[in-house]
Amino acid sequence: MQPKIIFGATIAFIFMGTIAQTPATAVQSRPNGQILQIDGEVQLQRSDGRVLNPAPGMPIYPGDRLLTADGGQAILQCANLSIESVSGDRSRNLCPANTEPECDREAVACAGERNDELFASNPNKPYIISPRRTALLSDRPTLRWNRVADVTQYTVILQENSEKLWQVTTTAAEIDYPADKPPLQPGSEYSLVVITDTGVLSFESPIPGGLGFRLLEESAVVEVREAQQAIEAEPLDEGAKALAIAYLYSRNDLIAEAIDILEDAIVDRTATAYLHRWLGELYWEKAKLKELAQTHYCQAMAFAPPEDREIETEAIDRVADECAMS
């Protein structure tokens, strides 16, 4: 299926695919937007009366109000990609209801879908980390896999339409796509296979849903690049621009490249509960990498304020036991 190009709202960056399943005392409806930017003094009041300190990435729901003071302003990114600015005391959430389908069966992964065979991340195997279940902009991506204890060398094989295209050996668990190898081509399906020097494969049999990747079609690349240029022209700080581009990528099935941007943001800028939550969602729902999803969900729980029940509930539903043991 050709990815849908999303660029109508140039500064959209929040991952909005998840439906919050919260306790009876918390918000029950589906989120219809996210906090994009906060200027000045702003608080968010949930429909159940809780008052929270908003931050970029925080979901908003019908019935929420933004409490502003001394010229404070909140900029909202709605689920329909429109941008709304809110100011004035007790201003309501202006975003329309979220009409996006809850699950697209033709997408890379259906949100919330649990297929244990897809969570193929055995630490004793060089399982593929990236690119995995994704489209790509780059025709020479970085290739990453799990480092296995006591392994000194890996054989890396790239398959094109199930036929071996090339192979190399390396002692690292990550390589840049070799410059002397043919670049990826639109219209082909690729898969990466890694074999340790002890004979262990990244996976031993075909995995339902696949772990492959493809290059975005040229026409789609042009549209994404134009949308990215529009984002870069917005009067936003570099962190907001990076997140805006990550959201653009994620909406166009460029999961690996969206993850790269978000992980760089965590390293280079202040990590937040909402940024870790977004990465947890991408690793869980799209890449199907449970251990990496667990890492970010546990960090989201650690950063989240106690009154923000939505993050805790989502993490508990997925990786609570692992967070307790880590």
Image: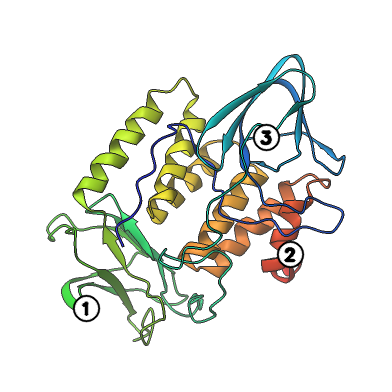
49 to the left or right of 157: right
Tell which of 66 and 58 is nearer to you: 66
Q: Give the residue drawn at x 49%, y 82%.
A: 117
Tell which of 276 and 34 is nearer to you: 34
**Image quadrant containing the N terminus:** bottom left
Whole-number angstrom distance, CA of label 2 to CA of label 3: 22 Å
Residue 151, horizontal then vertical, whole percent: 40, 76
The kind of residue on which mark 3 rests is Ala
Q: Check disc 2 and report its element: helix, strand or loop.
A: helix
Residue 38 location, quadrant = top right
Tell which circle, 1 or 2, labels the residue nearer the N-terminal end. 1
The kind of residue on which mark 2 rests is Ile
Q: Check disc 1 and report its element: helix, strand or loop.
A: loop
Residue 280 location, quadrant = bottom right
**Image quadrant containing the C terminus:** bottom right
Q: Give the residue drawn at x 75%, y 59%.
A: 313
State whether residue 271 is above or below residue 208: above
Disc 2 to disc 3: CB gap under 8 Å: no
Tell which circle, 3 or 1, labels the residue nearer the N-terminal end. 3
Residue designated by label 2 = 316
Residue designated by label 3 = 55
Residue 226, horizontal then vertical, whole percent: 29, 34
The kind of residue on which mark 1 rests is Ser
Colouring method of the image:
rainbow
**For the image shown, how many numbered marks are present on the structure?**
3
115 to the left or right of 212: right
Residue 130's disc number = none
State whether residue 214 is above or below residue 154: above
Most distant residue in the top direction: 70
Residue 5, horizontal then vertical, whole percent: 35, 46
